[in-house]
Image (tube, helix red, strand yellow):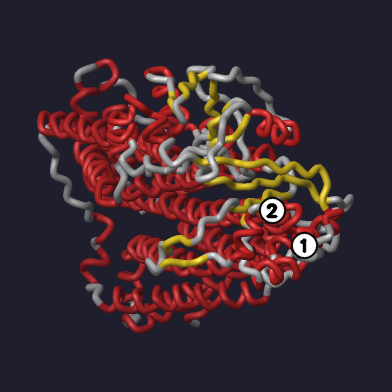
Amino acid sequence: MLFKLSVKNMKKSFKDYAIYFLTLVLGVAIFYMFNSLDSQQAMLQVSESTRKLIALMIDMLGVVSVFIAIILGFLIVYANNFLVNRRKKEFGIYMTLGMGKRQISKIILLETLLIGILSLLVGIFIGVFASQFMSILVAKLFEADMSEFTFVFSSGACIKTCIYFAVMFLAVMIFNTITISKYKLINLLTAVRKNEKVKMKNPILSVFVFLASVGILGYAYWKVTGGINELDTIEKILGPILMGTIGTIGIFWSLSGFILRVIQSSKKIYLRGTNMFVLRQLNNKINTTVVSMSVICIMLFMTISILSSSISVQNSMDTELEEMTPVDLNLFKTANLPDSYVSSYSGKTIYYTEEQKVDSRKSIVDTLKQNGYDISKLKDIVEIPIYTVPEWTWKYSLGNYYETAKAQYSMLAYDTPETLIKVSDYNKIASLYGQEQYTLNDNEYIVLCDFDSMVELRNAALKENSDIQVNGKIYHAKYNECQSGFINMSSSHTNTGVILLPDSFEWKEEWKEQKFLAANYNADTEEGKQEINKEFADDDSKLNENLSAKGIRLDGMTKITLIEASKGLSSIIIFIAIYLGIIFLIASSAILALKQLTESSDNKQRYNILRKIGCDEKMINQALFRQIAIFFMLPLVLAIIHSIFGIKFALTVLVVLAKPEELLPSIIVTAVVMGIIYGLYFLATYLGSKNIIKEEE
């Protein structure tokens, strides 16, 4: 009998369960999708290092899933609480008919169990099909071969999802049992007539608090943008975060009184149609949801910032990666080794062997040949010397601008020697890389730099003082700003400075020299390039074992390794960001929807009064629509304003990884995702509220 009653109640209250069911289904589907990647990676044809990166990403997503489960757990309990409160009168009638609290608890348990099973089935069904598209996304991000693509069902993800959500529903059942046990019959029967007590705020005080909150937010915005260079520690960043939180709470605390004060000043607007009713409803609603609205606003802000910044980072890294890896191989070797050096780790003096000192004077090509490497596996080989002069440091290059630069960028190591290259040597590399080549007179030099913040610093120094004296000779800057170019391959524009000097520059034996080699692999297929790459990238390759046995050190990087590492980093960022962003969006949308449905349920009598004074259904529905639209838009608008400055701060911090020009596509994607999910909840809330206010008592 109780089972039949539970099923009948679910059918009758399906409209009430719509938001709850939607939230559960989306939560289950997303949880399954992101936890099924371990099964999806099996069909991707990728290298061993990429497979390790995917495994790392899966492990990190597993950790994030625990956090996600906690958020969803609180959300499900919150949503369930709405449903229980919505049915207080129904439970009161059951008790008057002789049903005990234990039987009512059993009904709730059965309903929770049924809705849980149904949402799990539907959510996993959606998640299974959606995860196939996730496989395509993973393959695209890691540039994997999907020729063996097949439909995949992850039993592990399914079991994990069922276990996590079973624990959540168990918590809900316990919560419901405790809640029902505390109900009194008189309170259940009169619950529909009880409304939350609302204290009207002083409009003058509200205006003052509103303006003060705007000022606090404005100062916080300035700190994270205009004063960005001061925020170099976690402690300093916490200040603007705290100010932003206080300002957000202040805005919502004062908003109802502020809006009331502003709109009441215009009688034409205030007295038009149902505006007075809508305004009073909003006033009451915002007054009682200050903390909820603030939390929702912050979650929406995090959603927008996380999704936009992460997608921008991923797009920027992909764009720059192709440009910054023009060849397959870069190798470095320190030349003219001294007799010894002091270890930076132990502080002990380390002595070089005679064999190491002799080898340091050899070219990188000769070193490779003499250690068993078949040099025919490389083509387009260019090898050049790179110099450093002890007294030619960043501090010396900056000249009179040094004190200004130190105040602005205190964390930089200004005693670092500059990288010096003769212009003809650089042009060999530039020709191989497809970059611009340069010419110099005997008394000129050029600064190459592509790292944005360092470009600004060096340009300011060049314009203030461009003369440099080395070895008794004065050199003038050919250009008063940095030129484009780089030597080392990288995943992004990270060249902080290379100095090009004329070929007549005289190098002293005691100055440090480094040999640099750039080359391509002599292979036509990707598999062939992978085989050559292993000889340089794998520590246990024959070449590296021979070099290690003789104490010879060849540093460097390969294009394949750079691409795999960069793709792995950007993919991990984007997956975790999407996972967190969508969950935050679902949570904030669901809380907003449930708050509005609760208000609609509590205020049915007010809408009945509107009908009695002559308002038709069209006017009432328009009033309800405007009320819900404003209620949904308020936290979103403030979250968007927060995000404008938050994203700017994030891009400044992640300047190496993200570029502002890549921001527009990420904002469009974020807007589409938010529009679909947020809009879906808004529509469900409006339809649900419209049905609630039409119900007969």
Where in the figure is residue 582, as x and y percent of width and height? 51, 52
Q: Is mark 1 on a helix, strand or loop?
A: helix
Mark before the other along the chain sequence, 1 or 2:
2
- The x, y position of residue 330, in whole percent, is 68, 49
Quadrant for the C terminus, please: bottom left
Which residue does the numbered mark 2 point to in the structure image? 362
The residue that mark 1 highlights is 370
Residue at x-position 50% and y-position 58%: 23
Q: Residue at x 54, y 17 (%)?
A: 478
Which of the 4 image quarters holds residue 349? Answer: bottom left
Q: In which quarter of the image is residue 461?
A: top left
Proximity of marks 1 and 2: CB atoms separated by less than 8 Å = yes
Does 609 sit left or right of 380 as displayed? Answer: left
> Marks 1 and 2, how far apart in space?
10 Å
Q: Residue type at mark 2?
A: Lys
Q: What residue do we see at 48% from left, 73% from top?
A: 111
Mark 2: few/some/many CA within 10 Å (<14, 14-19, 20+)? some
| Residue closer to the observer: 490 or 655 | 490
Please provide percent x and percent y for residue 350.
47, 67
User: Relative to 590, is 116 above or below?
Assistant: below
Query: Which residue is drawn at the image coordinates 61% and 51% (left, top)?
Result: 566
Amino acid, disc 1: Gln
Does 49 appear above or below 406? below
Q: Nearer the viewer, residue 216 or 287?
A: 216
Q: Is residue 484 left or right of residue 291?
A: right
Question: Is any atom of residue 694 visible in this view?
Answer: no
Residue 687 to residue 17: above or below: above
Q: Where is residue 661 in the image (x, y as percent from the top left)?
A: 55, 30
